[in-house]
Image (cartoon, grey):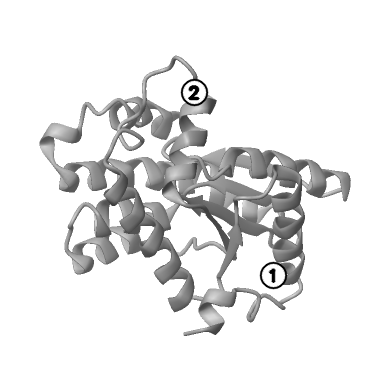
């Protein structure tokens, strides 16, 4: 049985990751593919148990190091229970956030040591890396506006409530990752309507699956 394909979607708050995963899953299933949709933190029973602790802010007083370790524990369970088996059976796995969110949220804006983050990542993923990472890029002010509109009366989570300048730093960090890893990452403007963004996402996926991704990421080309 051929190996499957692992796709992650990344980006700041309100970029539309959940919507684009849903639309992409519908598209791929219409093509006859076995598709698994999942998310982080969460995605497996063990990881979902950690999700509330992280997003509620219960771990925040203990600092970014503990948060990073909790994310890593959730990811390790998620990889072994969901992602690795699905890819092994030939499925396309679509994941809302993965390693790049940890690199950005706990590494860059959390101020954690890069060597510590790299070691934690290496142990956690145990060789399971995305074949394609789509970074949905949006101005943080617009993203936060959309996030407020989306959640309505619900309370902002641990990360949505942070200062605008932190969200701007995260946007820059995601774009820097794309510049460093153009073979894996594609940056897509998330500002247009969802249907237009979805067309760009489908194009990136088609190019990546055919081995033609390099060069799609304009930001990476300009480096």
- Does residue 171 appear anywhere in the picture? yes
How dense is the environment of label 2, judged by Cα within 10 Å: few (below 14), some, or many (20 and up)? Answer: few
Where residue 29 appears, x then y in whole percent?
Answer: 82, 44
Q: Left or right: 173 with respect to 149?
A: left
| Badge number at residue 151 | 2
**Quadrant of the image containing the N terminus:** bottom right
Is disc 2 placed on a helix, strand or loop? helix
Residue farthest along the left direction in this orientation: 62
Residue wearing tag 1: 208
User: Which residue appears at 47% of the width and 35% of the height?
Assistant: 145
Q: Earlier in the sequence, mark 1 or mark 2?
A: 2
Residue farthest along the right direction in this orientation: 31
Q: Nearer the viewer, mark 1 or mark 2?
A: 2
Vertical relation: 1 (above or below) 194: below
| Badge number at residue 54 | none
Where residue 34 appears, x then y in whole percent?
Answer: 77, 46
Where residue 189 appears, x then y in whole percent?
Answer: 60, 58
Where residue 42 appears, x then y in whole percent?
Answer: 45, 35
User: Which residue appears at 33% of the width and 60% of the height?
Assistant: 121
Vertical relation: 100 (above or below) 59: below
How dense is the environment of label 1, judged by Cα within 10 Å: few (below 14), some, or many (20 and up)? Answer: many
Vertical relation: 34 (above or below) 170: above
- Does residue 91 appear anywhere in the picture? no
Is disc 1 placed on a helix, strand or loop? helix
* 159 and 28: which is toward the camera: 159
Q: Left or right: 46 with respect to 109?
A: right
* 206 and 35: which is toward the camera: 206
Report how far apart the C-alphas of labels 1 and 2 lie in the structure.
33 Å
């Amino acid at each position: 049985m051929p190996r499957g394909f692992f796709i992650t979607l990344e980006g700041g708050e309100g970029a539309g990751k959940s919507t684009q995963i849903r639309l992409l899953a519908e598209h791929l299933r219409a093509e006859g593919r076995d598709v698994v949709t999942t998310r982080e933190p969460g995605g497996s029973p063990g990881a979902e148990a950690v999700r509330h602790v992280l997003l509620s802010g219960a771990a925040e007083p203990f600092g970014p190091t503990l948060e990073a370790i909790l994310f890593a524990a959730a990811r390790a369970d998620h990889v072994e229970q969901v992602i690795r088996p699905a890819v092994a059976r030939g499925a396309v796995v679509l994941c809302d956030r993965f390693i790049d969110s940890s690199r950005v949220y706990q590494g860059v804006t959390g101020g954690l040591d890069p060597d510590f983050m790299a070691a934690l990542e290496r142990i956690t993923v145990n060789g399971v890396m995305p074949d394609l990472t789509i970074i949905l890029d949006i101005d943080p002010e617009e993203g936060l506006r959309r996030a407020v509109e989306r959640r309505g009366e619900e309370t902002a989570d641990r990360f949505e409530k942070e200062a605008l300048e932190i969200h701007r730093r995260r946007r820059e960090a995601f774009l820097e990752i794309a510049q460093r890893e153009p073979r894996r990452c594609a940056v897509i403007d998330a500002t247009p309507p969802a249907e237009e963004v979805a067309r760009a996402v489908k194009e990136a996926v088609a190019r990546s699956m055919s081995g033609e991704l390099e060069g799609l990421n304009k930001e990476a080309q300009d480096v």
